[in-house]
Image (tube, rainbow, N blue to C red):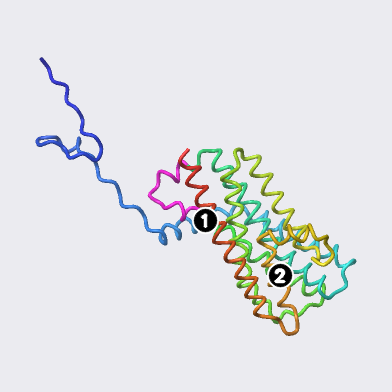
Amino acid sequence: MSVVPVRAAAGAVPEAGARPEEAAAPLAPRARLVPALAAVYRAQLSRARVARIPLLFVATFQSIGIMVLLRGVVDGGDPARSVVSGSSVLVVAFVALNLLAQYFGQLRAGGGLDHYATLPVPPAAVVLGAAAAYASFTVPGTVVTAVTGCVLFQLPMAHLWVLAAVLPLAGAALAGLGAALGLLAPRPELATLCGQLGMSAALLLGVLPAERMPAVIGWARDLLPSTYGVEAMARSFDPHPDWVAVCADLGVCAAVGVLSLAVATWAYRRAAAR
């Protein structure tokens, strides 16, 4: 009677006399978070630099156009600060929130998450790397928009260095929100819709002066992550800025950024496991 050989299961210790090719190959060690994050960041930044430059011009032109239109309505003072700050952060919302929601929605629908799931890369590295790449891609457009707005409304530029804190913190909050929307949406069309709605909310609630809005709209404005970046930048235009209030707004941005990126990481694990 012939005996059919039974192949050893993966991870089991092969029997004595088994051939080497029948033994289970050891898995490669899982990549550490920081090197994996850097690799994903470089790859996403290269991809964005090629495919997203025209959209960055659109985002910058859109924000500058809004300031030009409102220049005939807003003369100066607090409303002008809100317009310039909101238009500058709007560039971040267009790229980091809207485009990132579309990217992850298409990645999920096209099976791209399966590719990342087969790599020994932590889920947090994928989400953080993509979010950081899209957020840092907005730096030139945001700086150009802020400088143009200061010239249009005769605002001081002495404290524009605040953008160095506003950009990464507001970018992290909006990018995390965009990634979560793209990963949680059941279809890429809904991810695109959610990204567009989020950008529209950043436009309407961030650019328009808060004191001219109804109370209900003001509450909705407080729930938008980019609001606190807008407030921090607007306070920096004062002759003697309240740096405690600026730091408080930036702290809220940082907390929301950590929370939104954590939700996006959880959404990535959930989508990759399906």
Residue 10 rendering spot, x and y as whole percentages: 25, 37
Tell which residue pokes out farthest to the bottom in this image. Answer: 240
Q: Is residue 184 above or below residue 86?
A: above
Q: Start and end of the magenta stretch?
A: 114-127
Residue 238 rendering spot, x and y as whole percentages: 75, 80
Residue 173 rendering spot, x and y as whole percentages: 60, 60
- Mark 2: give few (<14), some (14-19) or many (20+) Cα within 10 Å: many
Q: Nearer the viewer, residue 183 or 220?
A: 220
Q: Name the residue that disc number 2 marks.
A: 231
Q: Quadrant of residue 73?
A: bottom right
The residue under the point 75% across, 62% down is 206
The residue under the point 80% across, 61% down is 215
Which type of secondary structure does the marked residue at label 1 adopt?
Answer: helix
Is 23 positioned to the left or the right of 51 in the image? left
The residue under the point 59% across, 38% down is 186
Amino acid bearing label 2? Glu
Q: Nearer the viewer, residue 43 or 221?
A: 221
